[in-house]
Each structure stands twice: as C-alpha cells, then as structure tokens.
Image: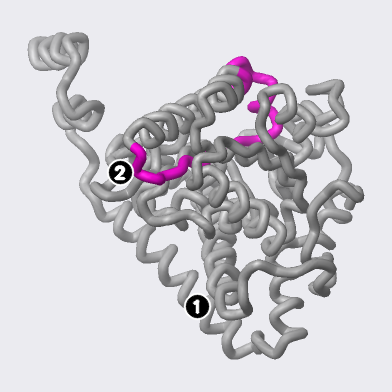
Amino acid sequence: MPHDTLQILSPDGALVGDPTIDLARTRELYAAMVVARVYDRKCTAMQKQGRLATYAPFEGQEACQIGSVAPLAPNDWVAGTYRDAAAMWFAGYPMVNLILGRTGDERGGNTPAGVNVLPPSITVGGHMIHAVGTGWADKIQGNGRVSLTLFGDGATSEGDFHEAMNFAGVFQTPTIFFCQNNGWAISLPFEQQTAAASLVDKAVGYGMPGVRVDGNDLLAVVAASDTAVHAARNGEGPTFIEAMTYRVGPHTTADDPGRYRTEDVTADWLKKDPIERVRSYLAKNGEWDAAWEDEVSSEASQEVEDAVAEAEALDPLSSNEVFDAMFAEPTQPLIEQRGMLRRDG
C-alpha cells in the first residue's frame, strides 16, 4: 500500500503496526465478518433464484463495514447505502428487515425502536446529508452521540457529498464520513471520477482531518474509526476516512463487471482478502483452529437461514396494507390513491 495509507495487518496476517484491539475482540469481529459474507453470498444466490430483487454484493468489503461500526456505542447513528448491509446489521438493524427490503416489502424499512440505523439509502450520496443532520441535532442536544455514514467512491462525485462535507466542517458536527473506495462507480474507474490523487485530499477543503486506510485490514479500519469516533464524541468535529478496498463481485446482480475490468485485477485483490487476513493473524497467535472455524461458520449460516425463513414466512401485504406501510401517518396523495383503489377494485 502507499506510504500514506494506514496499515496494521499485512495481507499475510503479520503485524506491521500496533493494533488498538485485543485478540478476543478481534475474534468477535472476525465472526461478524463471516456472518456478513455468508449473508452476502446467500442474498446473491436468492436473487438468482428470483427470491430477491436486484442485489448489491459487498464481498471483499467486510473489514470496512464491520471495522467502521466496531467503535460505535449502541445509541450512535449509522446511515448506509444499499451495499452496507453488514454495517447496518452489526449496528443493530435486523437482518430480516434487510432481506424484506430486498423483496420490495416496505416493512423492511421499519427500524425497531432503540435502533439508530437509518434504512438503506438507494439515492447515491443523499444519506450523507442525513448523517450530518443527526450529528448536528445531537451536537445541539449535547448528548455525545456521533453519526457514521458509509458510501462508495462514486458518491463523492455527487453534489450531496460536497454539501454534507461542507456543512459538517462549518458546524463541526460529530460525523464520520467513511468512504469505501472500491475502485469503481458502477463501471467508471476511479481515475475518471476525480483529478485528485486520492479522495482523502478532499478533507482539507472542508476543514476536517482525513486519513487513508487499507480497507481490507480490519485492524487499520478499527483504529482509524476509533480515532474519528473519539474526536467526534469529544467535540472535535468530523473526520473523513478513505478506505482502499475492492468489490469482488458486480456492482449489482444486474451488472457484468467483465465488460469493464479484467480478472487479473480481481485475482490480485483476492490475495488481500480481509477475512483470510484476520484468520491468518489469529492462527499465528494461537487464536484460531478448524473446530472454532466450523463453529463460527455453522452459527453464521444458521443466523442467516433463520432471517430468511422469518422474512419468507410473512404473509405479503394486501393492496390496502401497502399504503399503511409507507408512513406513520398517510399523506394526502396516499389517502386519495387508497380511495381510488377501493372505488376501482
């Protein structure tokens, strides 16, 4: 990795820096990463079977999503995208809701009370403004909460990104901007999105600190995120984190990455797999064995299968109930549309 990119764990699982979490916590996060990958592969398979709508895989980005959430408190805010299911789940968003959302069931967006995770954003970049809003509200209230927002490199080309960054910088909101730079905005390569040498350079223009990390290095992601969370919670304002990573699969299940990138690039990144890296690290320190791996994998599979079974066991919403699932209080257009349905039905 470039010299200005924070790395603590090398691709072969050797320490090249000082970790900020112990081995016990690393094992916990490793298990969460395994759940994330099982979920991702299951959803990809379900989409191909016609059981889910278009799905956005995140395999290869597990360290980013689990590691960025790890330093948060239970009442902190998380605002993610359609590709951030692992981060949302690890922050408390029910897996069954994530699956329901991908079936088009509006009940998937019904966040349980006490879970400060916004439903996944489909609008590229729009949710960053929401994270600045929750951060600003918490700053005014003085409750010490912080807001984490995750997004891809493509979102930094959107106007919402600049508005969110500028507002956060001016008002010093407790917001962590976590960019998963996976190299491609759908089919557009990074070098065609910006003339900047790196995205983290943009932090300077908004008056906030920025750090670039090896996004496939769980320990580096945790360390950078922990520093950013600590600063935000102590009134020091926002931080921009650029995590260098790679999406192994397509942009979505409707995409063919073979049309715009070569397999040798993917093969090189597979050698930096975030899960394999932590597994090697744990094994080097006597904290991994095949029996434990089997246990972790079995539990992960069961958790995912249980969530799928729960989602698919729900009766579909009736045409009338669809209107009730949109808002807490129906809007006037929805009331009128319901009336039209009843008259015409």
- Vertical side of 57 occupied by 278: above or below: below
Look at the numbered disc 1 and give the secondary structure of its residue. Answer: helix
Mark 1: give few (<14), some (14-19) or many (20+) Cα within 10 Å.
few
Identify the residue shown where x is 49% and y is 70%: 300
The C terminus is located in which quarter? top left
Q: Quadrant of residue 165?
A: top right
**Residue where numbered disc 2 is placed:** 111
Q: Amino acid at mark 1?
A: Ser
The CA distance from mark 1 to mark 2 is 27 Å
Classify 10 Å Cα crowding around label 2: few (below 14), some (14-19), many (20 and above).
Answer: some
Residue 175: percent from left, percent from top: 52, 37
- Magenta region, residue range: 142-162
The residue positioned 32% from the left and 53% from the top of the image is 312
Q: Residue at x 76, y 38 (%)?
A: 257
Point out the tag, 1 or 2, that comes first from the N-terminus. Answer: 2
Magenta segment: does it hold 271? no
Q: Which residue is mark 1?
A: 298
Q: Quick one: 332 or 146, which is closer to the camera?
A: 146
